[in-house]
Image (tube, grey):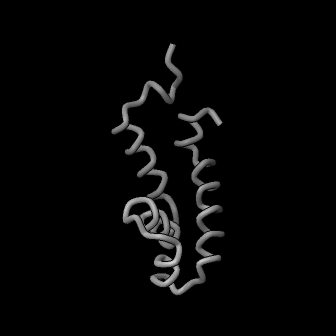
Amino acid sequence: SLSLLESFSLQELNSIVQKAVEDLPERERTIIQMYYFDDQNFRSIAEHLRLTESRISQLHSSIKEKLQKHPLLREITGI
Protein backbone atom coordinates (compact mmCIF):
# COMPACT_ATOMS: atom_id res chain seq x y z
CA SER A 1 0.00 0.00 0.00
CA LEU A 2 1.13 3.56 -0.70
CA SER A 3 2.22 5.85 2.12
CA LEU A 4 0.34 9.11 2.52
CA LEU A 5 3.26 10.96 0.92
CA GLU A 6 3.32 8.61 -2.09
CA SER A 7 -0.41 9.09 -2.66
CA PHE A 8 0.00 12.79 -3.50
CA SER A 9 0.71 14.00 -7.02
CA LEU A 10 3.65 16.33 -7.60
CA GLN A 11 1.20 19.16 -8.23
CA GLU A 12 -0.54 18.50 -4.91
CA LEU A 13 2.79 18.41 -3.06
CA ASN A 14 3.88 21.67 -4.69
CA SER A 15 0.62 23.27 -3.61
CA ILE A 16 1.07 22.11 -0.01
CA VAL A 17 4.68 23.34 0.13
CA GLN A 18 3.64 26.66 -1.42
CA LYS A 19 0.95 27.11 1.26
CA ALA A 20 3.47 26.37 4.02
CA VAL A 21 5.91 28.90 2.53
CA GLU A 22 3.12 31.51 2.28
CA ASP A 23 2.62 31.18 6.03
CA LEU A 24 6.20 32.34 6.68
CA PRO A 25 7.03 35.96 7.55
CA GLU A 26 7.98 38.09 4.54
CA ARG A 27 11.76 38.00 5.01
CA GLU A 28 11.75 34.22 5.37
CA ARG A 29 9.52 33.85 2.29
CA THR A 30 11.95 36.05 0.37
CA ILE A 31 14.91 33.87 1.34
CA ILE A 32 13.10 30.68 0.27
CA GLN A 33 11.89 32.28 -2.96
CA MET A 34 15.30 33.59 -3.92
CA TYR A 35 17.21 30.43 -2.98
CA TYR A 36 14.92 27.69 -4.30
CA PHE A 37 12.96 29.37 -7.07
CA ASP A 38 15.20 32.19 -8.31
CA ASP A 39 18.39 30.09 -8.00
CA GLN A 40 20.25 32.74 -5.97
CA ASN A 41 23.13 31.89 -3.65
CA PHE A 42 23.43 33.06 -0.04
CA ARG A 43 25.79 35.87 -1.02
CA SER A 44 23.34 37.47 -3.46
CA ILE A 45 20.46 37.02 -1.01
CA ALA A 46 22.57 38.66 1.71
CA GLU A 47 23.32 41.63 -0.54
CA HIS A 48 19.64 41.99 -1.44
CA LEU A 49 18.50 41.87 2.20
CA ARG A 50 21.52 43.80 3.52
CA LEU A 51 22.54 40.97 5.83
CA THR A 52 25.69 38.88 6.08
CA GLU A 53 26.03 35.66 4.15
CA SER A 54 26.46 33.86 7.47
CA ARG A 55 23.16 35.30 8.76
CA ILE A 56 21.38 34.09 5.61
CA SER A 57 22.80 30.62 6.22
CA GLN A 58 21.52 30.68 9.82
CA LEU A 59 18.09 31.92 8.73
CA HIS A 60 17.91 29.30 5.96
CA SER A 61 18.56 26.52 8.48
CA SER A 62 15.94 27.80 10.90
CA ILE A 63 13.40 28.26 8.09
CA LYS A 64 13.91 24.66 6.96
CA GLU A 65 13.31 23.46 10.52
CA LYS A 66 10.21 25.64 10.78
CA LEU A 67 8.84 24.26 7.51
CA GLN A 68 9.49 20.67 8.61
CA LYS A 69 7.32 21.37 11.67
CA HIS A 70 4.52 23.03 9.68
CA PRO A 71 1.25 21.14 10.27
CA LEU A 72 0.58 20.63 6.53
CA LEU A 73 4.02 19.15 5.93
CA ARG A 74 4.09 17.09 9.13
CA GLU A 75 0.82 15.48 8.13
CA ILE A 76 2.08 14.26 4.76
CA THR A 77 5.57 13.25 5.86
CA GLY A 78 4.47 11.56 9.07
CA ILE A 79 7.29 13.27 11.00
The reply, left or right, for residue 71 in relation to residue 12 is: right
Q: Find residue 38 and report its image quarter.
A: bottom left
Q: Find residue 57 and report its image quarter.
A: bottom right
Q: Residue furthest bottom?
A: 50
The reply, left or right, for residue 73 in relation to residue 15 is: right
- Against 77, residue 1 (above or below) is above
**Which residue is rendered at x = 42% and y = 64% of the image?**
33
- Against 19, residue 57 (above or below) is below
Please provide percent x and percent y for residue 19.
Answer: 43, 51
Please provide percent x and percent y for residue 52.
Answer: 60, 83
**Which residue is rendered at x = 52% and y = 87% of the image?**
50
Q: Find residue 12 and report its image quarter.
A: top left
**Which residue is rendered at x = 59% and y = 61% of the image?**
63
Q: Residue furthest left?
A: 11
- Against 53, residue 33 (above or below) is above
Please provide percent x and percent y for residue 13.
Answer: 42, 39
The reply, left or right, for residue 23 in relation to residue 11 is: right
Instruction: Tell me the quadrant of the picture where the C terminus can be found.
Output: top right
- Against 12, residue 38 (above or below) is below
Number of marks in the image?
Answer: 0
**Which residue is rendered at x = 59% and y = 56% of the image?**
64
